[in-house]
């Protein structure tokens, strides 16, 4: 009701307000991922001297004083819609949406385009093999994805037009090639090897199931379903001075999970990363291997050409389906169905065995059109933000 009323009154008014040098950013969780990487690049180039940088966040108070007057943090509806803006907050929100020259977002897109000349760019949260018939929305001028290999699938989904698709990769991928000490920051010490496990959510925070057969265990990860198995993995990791970081999807329902970190297995959420001042892709770029399923993260990790293992025990249970029919052929690495497979991959990393380097390069050519880096720089240049 508030949305419709405000649109009715604001639409004619904003025609009287000229566009200003304002750039809007949004991400979920707050202040991270593609939008954060692009923002950091712009700040490093001094673009805040010309443009007012405005972040849409759920908790503006968390960022009070972070950049002084150079950057403004304003409130936006929460992703799960449990916290909605009041009238005053809506007016502030729509004012900046109306006057911004550029808006770069990944999740909570501005509901309406209020002013001619505005440029809305959906940075998305990564291209992966999952079906393109997803909630891209429609209120954008361009959407970023990783390769024209998937152009037909995206256009056929009815969510965008061919001319709106830009195969420019993701700004966050710049962090894959930037030195960091993310593992030590998070775990408190160094390890011989580290593995990041990033499962796609099985049960959304709203309770909605995204797989036909709900296999969510008390550990929150596929295949490893008991505390005894976690303890066995801990022992193997300890013997090899290794760390396994299990990073939950931000939309994963974490209620009722019985999990505890230890010196060799670290469970993380987006909040944990934020509290430690670590960006996810800084951590990803530092790891020696990745475990995932059909998450878009593995398309990005292919740029590093490091070992990947895939949990495929429920791969045909994903309700939305995939961009390609031969999904397993687009997953270059160990395909894991059992607990023994997981132990085998840990052993591969410990002993630096890698049988899939060549196949990763072949798939990388298909799924990542731009493999040269400097993704944020190219976006700034593409839209002539000077």
Image (cartoon, grey):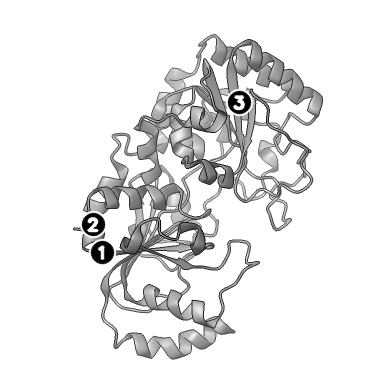
Residue plotted at (68% across, 27% down): 262
Residue 4 percent coordinates (x, y): 53, 84
Task: Report if residue 323 is visible in the image.
Answer: no
Instruction: Give yes or no for contact between labels 3 and 1 (Cβ–Cβ under 8 Å).
Output: no
Marks 3/2: CA distance?
38 Å
Marks 1/2: CA distance?
6 Å
- Label disc, if present, on residue 244 of the rendered structure: 3
Marks 3/1: CA distance?
41 Å
Q: Earlier in the sequence, mark 3 or mark 1?
A: 1
Q: Relative to residue 187, is residue 11 drawn left or right?
A: left
Task: Decide: is 184 above or below 48.
Answer: above
Q: Quadrant of residue 241?
A: top right
- Label disc, if present, on residue 341 of the rendered structure: none
- In this rendered view, identify the residue nearer to me: 310 or 203: 203
Kindly identify which residue carries mark 2. 47
Report crowding for label 3: few under 14, some 14 to 19, many 20 or more residues within 10 A (C-alpha): many
Q: Quadrant of residue 161?
A: bottom left
Residue 324 percent coordinates (x, y): 53, 41
Residue 181 percent coordinates (x, y): 43, 29
Q: Earlier in the sequence, mark 3 or mark 2?
A: 2
Instruction: Give yes or no for contact between labels 1 and 2 (Cβ–Cβ under 8 Å).
Output: yes
Residue plotted at (43% across, 68% down): 139
Q: Relative to residue 374, is residue 346 drawn left or right?
A: right
Kindly identify which residue carries mark 1. 51
Residue 321 percent coordinates (x, y): 61, 46
Residue plotted at (65% across, 45% down): 201
Report crowding for label 1: few under 14, some 14 to 19, many 20 or more residues within 10 A (C-alpha): many
- In this rendered view, identify the residue nearer to me: 227 or 68: 68
Residue plotted at (42% across, 24% down): 305
Q: Secondary structure at mark 3?
A: strand
Q: Secondary structure at mark 1?
A: loop
Instruction: Quadrant for the C terminus, please.
Output: bottom left
């Amino acid at each position: 009701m508030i949305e419709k009323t405000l649109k009715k009154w604001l639409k004619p008014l904003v025609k009287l307000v000229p566009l200003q040098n304002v750039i809007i950013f949004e991400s979920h969780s707050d202040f991270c991922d593609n939008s954060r990487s692009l923002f950091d690049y712009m700040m490093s180039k001094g673009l805040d001297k010309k443009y007012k940088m405005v972040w849409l966040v759920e908790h503006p108070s968390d960022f009070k004083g972070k950049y002084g007057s150079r950057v403004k943090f304003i409130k936006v509806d929460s992703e799960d819609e449990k916290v909605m803006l009041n009238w005053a907050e809506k007016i502030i929100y729509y004012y900046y949406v109306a006057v911004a020259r550029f808006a770069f977002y990944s999740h909570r897109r501005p509901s309406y385009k209020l002013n001619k000349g505005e440029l809305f760019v959906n940075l998305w949260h990564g291209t992966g093999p999952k079906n393109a018939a997803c909630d891209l929305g429609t209120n954008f001028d361009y959407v970023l994805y990783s390769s024209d290999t998937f152009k037909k699938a995206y256009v056929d989904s009815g969510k965008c037009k061919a001319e709106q698709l830009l195969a420019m990769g993701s700004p966050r991928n710049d962090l894959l090639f930037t030195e960091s000490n993310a593992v030590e920051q998070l775990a408190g010490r160094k390890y011989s090897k580290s593995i990041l496990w990033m499962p796609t959510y099985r049960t959304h925070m709203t309770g909605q199931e995204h797989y036909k057969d709900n296999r969510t265990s008390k550990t929150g990860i596929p295949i490893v379903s008991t505390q005894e198995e976690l303890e066995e993995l801990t022992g193997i990791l300890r013997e090899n001075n290794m760390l396994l970081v299990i990073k939950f999807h931000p939309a994963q329902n974490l209620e009722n999970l019985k999990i505890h970190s230890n010196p060799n297995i670290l469970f993380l959420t987006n909040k944990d990363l934020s509290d430690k001042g670590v960006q996810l892709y800084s951590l990803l770029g530092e790891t020696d291997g990745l475990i995932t399923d059909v998450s878009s993260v593995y398309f990005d990790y292919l740029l590093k050409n490091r070992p990947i293992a895939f949990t495929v025990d429920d791969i045909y249970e994903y309700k939305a389906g995939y961009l390609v029919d031969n999904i397993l052929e687009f997953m270059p690495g160990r395909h894991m169905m059992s607990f023994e497979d997981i132990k085998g991959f840990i052993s591969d990393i410990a002993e630096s065995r890698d049988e899939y380097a060549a196949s990763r390069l072949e798939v990388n050519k298909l799924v990542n059109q731009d493999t040269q880096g400097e993704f944020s720089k190219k976006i700034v240049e593409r839209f002539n933000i000077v």
